[in-house]
Image: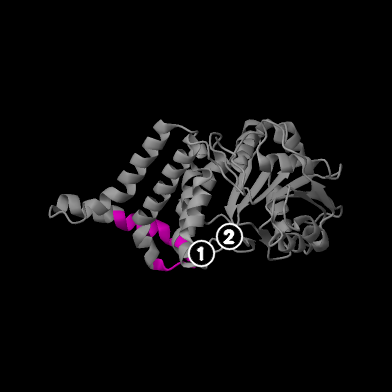
């Protein structure tokens, strides 16, 4: 039932007399346009905790550091040149970890474009963590305003939860995932799994962290934001969205041509074959394929509603799937040509 998208953070029920220290770590590379809103929204969070916000300025060419400091960041860490074997974001996080308080019980990894609309959101994260979870992670509400976003962004979340059903992530040892925009992890668990160095070469760092948590015997809660935790980054045209998908899709398939072929075949039979046979005069073929198409639309409706996309977009899920397949093939071609994982001028997957 992943498609219902029903996993949401609970209301805060924390009743501690002592304060918990949360170390917030934000990697930022040329994020002057968005980082102030992120830092300021964190400063407005209320609850039985103390925040220490560290921003890792990853060789920015703009005023990221100055903007973050003015917005209320406690520490700005200039990221040093990246050593061999580290991915860019993970090295920035590693540099920032040198500045977190020694008494921090939790670490919140959050991206520079993720803002927190309500003042009780960190208290909600802590409440969920205190239910026995080592990692609490929330898929941020992505912007869905432009035509391209309304057509394509709901499917991004839908397919993510299709790959990683939250109930499986919470309950099955073999399924692990996380959403990198917002990840609250117990520091003791993080140290137990070996910290960032244990997955320093991972392009998809959030899911790599999820796997490490599970391998260390930890528990994960994965949910979706109701709009309170949201991305301020926009994707105004399909080219930008395609590049976002292509950056890591082939890495998700373990750079395997065989798995890529299986993925293409699976998506083809799931979404395109029903459309292909809709016009057949044989009712024994036509009715089942019509049912398959309508079921795919019904399953997509909660995602469309969540993001305020038109309901009719559920009927074109097969066409949206084609877009995602094209981006996945592009991801493979980029990798094979030595241009994989490009992010702000860096090739990270080749």
**Along the line of sight, the residue nearer the viewer: 52 or 46:** 52
Read off the residue under disc 1: 307
Q: Is residue 331 above or below residue 259?
A: below
Instruction: Say whether disc 1 or disc 2 marks the residue closer to the N-terminus.
Output: 2
Q: What stretch is highlighted in magenta?
A: 293-311
Disc 1 element: loop
Is residue 272 at all visible to an observer of this figure?
Answer: yes
What's the coloring here? Answer: one colour
In terms of depth relative to the viewer, which is nearer, 174 or 32? 32
Instruction: Give the residue displayed 69% in from the left and 56% down from the top.
Output: 31
Q: Residue at x 57, y 42 (%)?
A: 177
Tell me how far mark 1 sits from mark 2, CA to CA: 8 Å
The residue pinned by badge 2 equals 141
- Position of 135 compared to 331: left or right? right
In screen coordinates, is 199 left or right of 40?
left
Q: Determine which of the numbered discs, if any, sits on residue 235 in the image.
A: none
Residue 334 painted magenta: no
């Amino acid at each position: 039932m992943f498609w219902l998208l029903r996993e949401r953070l609970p209301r805060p029920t924390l009743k501690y007399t002592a304060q918990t220290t949360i170390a917030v770590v934000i990697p930022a590379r040329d994020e002057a346009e968005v980082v102030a809103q992120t830092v300021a929204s964190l400063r407005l969070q209320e609850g039985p905790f103390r925040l220490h916000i560290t921003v890792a300025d990853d060789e920015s060419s703009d005023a990221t550091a100055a903007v973050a400091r003015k917005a209320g960041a406690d520490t700005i860490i200039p990221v040093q040149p990246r050593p061999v074997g580290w991915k860019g974001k993970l090295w920035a996080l590693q540099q920032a970890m040198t500045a977190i308080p020694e008494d921090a019980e939790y670490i919140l990894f959050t991206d520079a474009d993720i803002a927190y609309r309500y003042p009780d959101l960190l208290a909600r994260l802590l409440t969920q963590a205190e239910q026995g979870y080592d990692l609490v992670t929330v898929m941020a509400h992505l912007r869905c305003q432009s035509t391209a976003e309304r057509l394509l962004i709901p499917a991004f979340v839908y397919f993510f939860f299709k790959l990683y059903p939250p109930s499986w992530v919470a309950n099955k040892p073999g399924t692990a995932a996380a959403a990198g925009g917002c990840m609250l992890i117990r520091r003791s668990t993080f140290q137990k799994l070996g910290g960032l160095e244990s997955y320093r070469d991972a392009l998809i760092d959030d899911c790599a962290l999820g796997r490490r948590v599970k391998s260390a015997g930890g528990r994960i809660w994965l949910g979706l934001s109701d709009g309170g935790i949201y991305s301020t980054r926009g994707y105004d045209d399909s080219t930008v969205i395609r590049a976002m998908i292509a950056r890591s899709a082939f890495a998700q398939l373990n750079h395997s041509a065989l798995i890529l072929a299986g993925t293409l075949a699976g998506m083809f039979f799931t979404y395109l074959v029903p459309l292909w046979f809709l016009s057949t005069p044989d009712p024994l073929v036509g009715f089942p394929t019509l049912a398959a198409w309508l079921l795919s639309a019904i399953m997509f409706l909660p995602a469309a509603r969540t993001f305020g996309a038109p309901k009719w977009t559920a009927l074109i899920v097969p066409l949206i799937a084609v877009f995602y397949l094209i981006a996945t093939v592009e991801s493979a071609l980029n990798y094979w040509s030595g241009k994989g994982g490009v992010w702000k001028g860096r090739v990270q997957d080749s």
